[in-house]
Image (cartoon, rainbow, N blue to C red):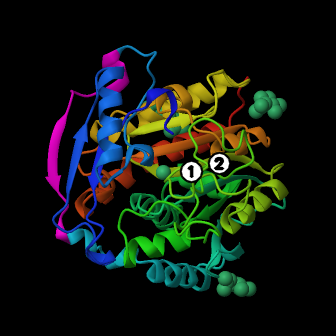
Amino acid sequence: MPPRGLLPLCLLCLQAALPLPARYRGDKVIRVVPESERETRILKAAFNRLKVGSCTTGGPVAAQQHLPHHQRYGHRRASTTEHIPKSAALPPASKHPVHIQDWMHHLNNTHSDLVHMFSVGKSYEGRPLFVLKLGKRSRPYKKAVWIDCGIHAREWIGPAFCQWFVKEALQTHQTDPAMRKMLTQLYFYIMPVFNVDGYHFSWTNDRFWRKTRSKNTRFRCHGVDANRNWKVKWCDEGASFHPCDDTYCGPFPESEPEVKAVAHFLRKHRKQIKAYLSFHAYAQMLLYPYSYKYATIPNFSCVESAAYNAVNALESAYGIRYRYGPASSTLYVSSGSSMDWAYKNGIPYAFAFELRDTGHFGFLLPETLIKPTCTETMLAVKNITLHLLKKCH
Ligand SMILES: *[C@@H]1O[C@H](CO)[C@@H](O)[C@H](O)[C@H]1NC(C)=O
Ligand SMILES: *[C@@H]1O[C@H](CO)[C@@H](O)[C@H](O)[C@H]1NC(C)=O
Ligand SMILES: *[C@@H]1O[C@H](CO)[C@@H](O)[C@H](O)[C@H]1NC(C)=O
Ligand SMILES: [Zn+2]
């Protein structure tokens, strides 16, 4: 269940009779922001009665009851409908999963001085889990930054950003002193598609697929929420025990091979890795721990000032203002997340980005917005990583 009477912001009406690829054709997205407990109850009841799917837990703006109302929503009470565009089924070829893999192999071959591609394991369906290690081999020991994209399959802007980051780094490190410094003094471990099976499935079968694709022994529903499967207050508030829910935590922590492989890698390199950055969409937020409880992290002031500077840097590009703060009070409470896990395992700067937008296009962010979104996000990421290289007390 969503935490604290949290709020079906978005109901997606599914016509289950249609074949899968056409599942959403002619469907509508209805966005509803309930304004009271009572409205929330009514919506939930309606929600159970109708055959609808919800994207509540998928990242749209949501918030806690204890905040003042205008802060909670950050936008007007909205009740809009929009048709899901047919083009949702025809995404740009540049982001196709197979294409991303070819692109990584290509970089590994053509930029072997700066890029090393390796696999940290295999997905449930047997796909390699590729990571790019990016940086100059200037000295034996360097601090490192971990970046992952696409934990949630349908959040396509994530993998696009990871690719953008690598492309920009390779194109600008000779001319941009900041980037040169980053690649000289740090290694970046970049995983463009964390949830490869789910991402694939979101291209072939279901554009709004979120979870992994693992099978369940007792239910016909597939998949686990790869951002509820980590061993940190696992399957508590903001996660579901039910295999058919979008926030299903899995049968046990690290049950998903993708989560297990990355957790293993991060554990092994936790002395070296100083920042963990995970890319999601959508909400326009920069979040730091904790996600699973309302409490202040020990190194609050360093993390908070990194976030403050990063959102200002981001805003300087196109005036897009991100909210920032602890995930629990800024977005919602969720347990078993990768960010909390990274922080608890000794990575002092752990952040989750919720990229554009705030719900107008939602997961279907059009191609024309990929470039501006990546450009501004790049400023935030550069700002955070340069902050790492300074002392903070
Ligand atoms: C990347 O290139 C190196 C050689 O530079 C090679 O050893 C390695 O296997 C390549 N990685 C992949 C995933 O093919
Ligand atoms: C980070 O962003 C802040 C706010 O925009 C800015 O003052 C600072 O110079 C930036 N730092 C770097 C290293 O880019
Ligand atoms: C907080 O910062 C100090 C000094 O930078 C560091 O030694 C410590 O590990 C950090 N603690 C956490 C929980 O990140
Ligand atoms: Zn997400």
For badge 2, the amino acid type reads Ser
* Circle 1 residues within 10 Å: few <14, some 14–19, many ≥20: many
Q: Residue 319: give x, y in percent of width and height.
A: 28, 36
> Label 2 CB, ligand 4: below 8 Å?
no
- The range drawn in magenta is 69-86
Seen in the picture, residue 202 relative to 185 is either above or below; the reply is below
Q: Residue 294: give x, y in percent of width and height.
A: 61, 22
Left or right relative to 18: residue 257: right
For badge 1, the amino acid type reads Ser
Q: Residue 374: give x, y in percent of width and height.
A: 39, 54
Decide: marks 2, 1 in contact (CB < 8 A)? Answer: yes
Frontmost residue, 270 versus 43: 43
Seen in the picture, residue 255 relative to 293 is either above or below; the reply is below
Seen in the picture, residue 178 relative to 268 is either above or below; the reply is above
Left or right relative to 85: residue 17: right
Magenta span contains residue 101: no
Q: Residue 56: give x, y in percent of width and height.
A: 39, 43
Q: Secondary structure at mark 2?
A: helix
Q: Check residue 338 in the rendering and tell me which mark sits there, or answer none.
A: 2
Question: How far apart, in angstroms, are the residues tagged by discs 2 and 1?
Answer: 8 Å
Magenta span contains residue 78: yes
Left or right relative to 51: residue 256: right
Residue at 49% x, 44% y is 353
Quarter of the figure with residue 115: bottom right
Residue corresponding to mark 1: 278
Frontmost residue, 92 versus 380: 92
